[in-house]
Image (tube, rainbow, N blue to C red):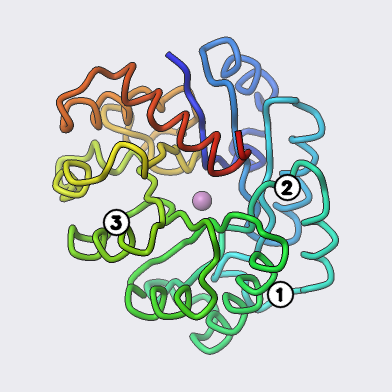
Amino acid sequence: MKIFETHAHLDHPQFASDRDAVIKSCSQQGIDFIINIGCDKQTTLDSIALAEKYEFVYASAGYHPHDAKEFDLDFLKKQAAHPKIIAIGEIGLDYYRYLSPKAIQQDVFRKQLQLAVELKKPVVVHNREANEDCLQILREFKPEKVVYHCFSGDVFYAREVLMEGWFISFTGNITYKNSNLAEVIRIIPFDRYFVETDCPYLAPHPLRGKRNDPRNLRYIIEKIAEIKGISPKLAAEQSYRNALKFFLNK
Ligand code: NI
């Protein structure tokens, strides 16, 4: 089974004691690509360091809405020029935790979208309880490639996202008992989705609550396969091919 991890935070302190062992074990278990996601200045630098150390690890650069207050455009431009930075993200809006004021979140989201358009880089979107504003701001800039990371909307919202030509990526939350994402998975075209762990967060059932890592992607792949009535191998391959084209132009 060929697996592409599209969203990991392996720089997280929870991996302090065994980070290298986990990453090496991933490559031995069929995970051919990992994108480590930047959320602020430090995590962007740490993601680049991991990408420099491991050939199969790539990185993104960006300011998460929680960290919008510390936004630094010059820093972001400089990091985005690194050959292993293959996306701008995760960026977006979070009206659930409101760790940055709404106006600042929107302003920083717009500035980063502008940069992504200029650099022709894919955009990894974080959206929490900001559906309408998120769509509207994305439509202002019309980046060529957009993925809604950790999609948690309903089927109507999914259709709006898909109609724009954008992508949806699924985490371990699709395996939870209270998940209402089955309908979204059922309707999503085979060429418009990815899988991701968002590790160390969101460990899939039956590991919920534990530290997550990319080796658990198989639980997410199996769930998608079950809902779509295809083999896990095919589900993994679809996501893999989509991610390769989207992030690496291959
Ligand atoms: Ni994340």
Q: Is mark 1 within 8 Å of ligand 1?
A: no
Residue assigned mark 2: 85
Q: Which residue lies at the image location 61% right of the left edge and 48% below the top edge?
A: 37
Which amino acid does the dot numbered 2 rest on? Ile
Residue assigned mark 3: 152
Q: Nearer the viewer, mark 1 or mark 2?
A: 2
**Residue 116 located left or right of residue 191:** right
Q: Nearer the viewer, mark 2 or mark 3?
A: 2
Quadrant position of the N terminus in the picture: top left
Residue assigned mark 1: 70
Relative vertical location of residue 236 with respect to residue 181 in this rendering, above or below: above
Which amino acid does the dot numbered 1 rest on? Glu
**Residue 13 located left or right of residue 246:** right
Mark nearer the N terminus (3 vs 1): 1
Which amino acid does the dot numbered 3 rest on? Ser
Taking depth in this image into account, of 166 and 71 the one nearest to the observer is 166
**Dot 2: element:** strand
Taking depth in this image into account, of 16 and 137 the one nearest to the observer is 137
Q: Position of residue 95 (x, y in %)?
A: 40, 76
Mark nearer the N terminus (1 vs 2): 1
Q: Nearer the viewer, mark 3 or mark 1?
A: 3
